Each structure stands twice: as C-alpha cells, then as structure tokens.
Amino acid sequence: LYSSAASDVYKRQPQGCFATAELLLTVENRPSIIIPTALEYCDPNSDGIGQFDLTTAEANLLNGQTNITITYYDTEIDAENAVNVIATPTAHANDQHYNDTVYARLEDNSGLTCHSIIPLPLIVKDTPKVQDPEQFLLCDDITRDGKEGFDLTSREAQILGTLNASGHTFQYYVDKVEADAGSNQFIANKDNYTNGATATLLVPQTIFVRITETATGCASVRPLELVVGAKPIANNSTR
C-alpha cells in the first residue's frame, strides 16, 4: 500500500540496465454521503403499500453538491452494479409492506468514475380509521332563514368511534381540496358555525372534517352534512 502527498512516482527494475517511467496517480473523491430523512406515505386503505416520489429526497441526498446524477435501485447490489434501475422514481411502490429501503446511486458528472450508494428508507403509515358522521340536523328559529349555529365539535366523538380523542385533532373546511391539503383555510368558529350564505331550508350544506393522528401526522377527511329544518307553524285560529 503506497500513500504519499506527491502526485508523481518512478519505477526502476532492481537489476541490470534500467529506465525510469513516470506514473501519474490520481485520487478521485466520491460524492459525499449523508443519512437522508426517510420518505413517508399515509396509507388510506391500510395495505402497507404506498406510492413514493423518490425524487423529493434529492435535495436532501445532494446536500448542496452539484453536477451529480442520482439513480435509484431496489437492492444495494443492483445499485453498486448500476443494473435494474427503478424506471419511474416519481411513482415507486414499496416492495416490503410498511417499511422498505431503496438505494440511491450518486455519480459525479465530471467524467470521474467514483460513485456513492446511500440507503433511502420508505415508511408507510395508516391513516386514522374514523367513522362517517350522521347528518347534522337543527330546527330553524322564527326567522325561517335556513341558517343556524352548528356546534361542529359535537360530532367528534361519533367520528372517532373507538379511537382515542386525546391522540387526534380536528379541523373543519368548507372546501374538500383545502381539507385534503390541510391548509390554514379552516373554519375558525367550529363551536358555533353558521351554515352557508346560500343555505335554504332542508337543503344540506356539506363541509369536510379533517382528522389528524398526532403520533403519525396522517389524516383522514370525512364529509359532514348540515341541514336546517323548518319548525311547524302553530295555527292559532279559533272556531
């Protein structure tokens, strides 16, 4: 094993006539390795299989390095030999249920031949198994305008079923897209929410409840129908 800070060495035969030849030794640096953050997927059907976009880990894998190509493989051996590359890294299903690992191969694009292999963990988590709430019906007041104040929190126990209330949080949305995304456009006055401006008697307004498990960060979204019914009008006529 030869180690030296010099870049040139010379070779001479041990006996007889000799000649010298210059050998140039080059040390190539591999792409640097960091331990990446695992990719996580919230599984709505609890089968332990998720669709992962592996490319979302690239900023983490590169850690500021440039001029690097990343490819992904199911096994470390495939990654070392650069065979059986994952063809669709933006939509990759894990092979092992719930916990799996793929391998990222980082190669320098500057013409060097060195590479690095980094394991990338994939984790699948179940979404909360909640119940669909029953229609929420209130009777209209004397204004008969089709609007009432709903305490949305009164349906939380029904939605949770047997799940632990302390391990879950609730947010309520008018729009399903916002509920699915978990945006900050949620209903603030959830304990006294007045149904929509266009509400009419017996015509339901559907809002959307987002239930998040605090331990996993995974969420389920369920629709909740709000209905205002008309009170019967007493007939005070006399014969």
Image: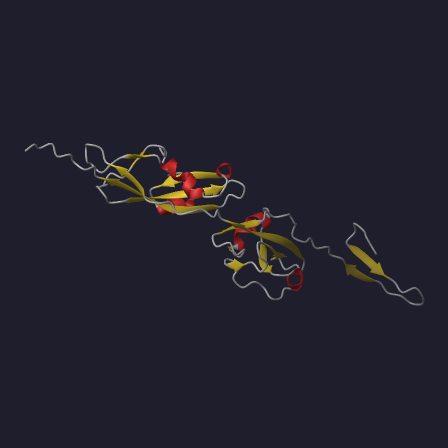
| Residue 181, x across and y down, in percent | 42, 45
| Residue 78, x across and y down, in percent | 64, 63
All told, the count of numbered labels is 0
Give the left or right position of residue 6, taking residue 88 as reference.
Answer: right
| Residue 120, x across and y down, in percent | 61, 53
Q: Nearer the viewer, residue 68 or 238?
A: 238
Up the image or down, 14 lies above or below 208; here it is below
Q: Residue at x 59, y 50 (%)?
A: 61
Residue found at the very far front of the displayed protein: 239
Observer able to see residue 65: no
Residue found at the very far left of the displayed protein: 239
Q: Nearer the viewer, residue 1 or 58?
A: 58
Q: Nearer the viewer, residue 96 or 66?
A: 96
Quadrant housing residue 104: bottom right
Q: Residue at x 24, y 38 (%)?
A: 197
Give the left or right position of residue 121, taking residue 126 as reference.
Answer: right
Q: Quadrant of the C terminus?
A: top left
Residue found at the very far bottom of the displayed protein: 16
| Residue 196, x across and y down, in percent | 27, 39
Q: Quadrant of the N terminus?
A: bottom right
Observer able to see residue 212: yes
Up the image or down, 41 lies above or below 169; here it is below
Q: How is the image coloured?
A: secondary structure
Give the left or right position of residue 192, taking residue 212 as reference.
Answer: left
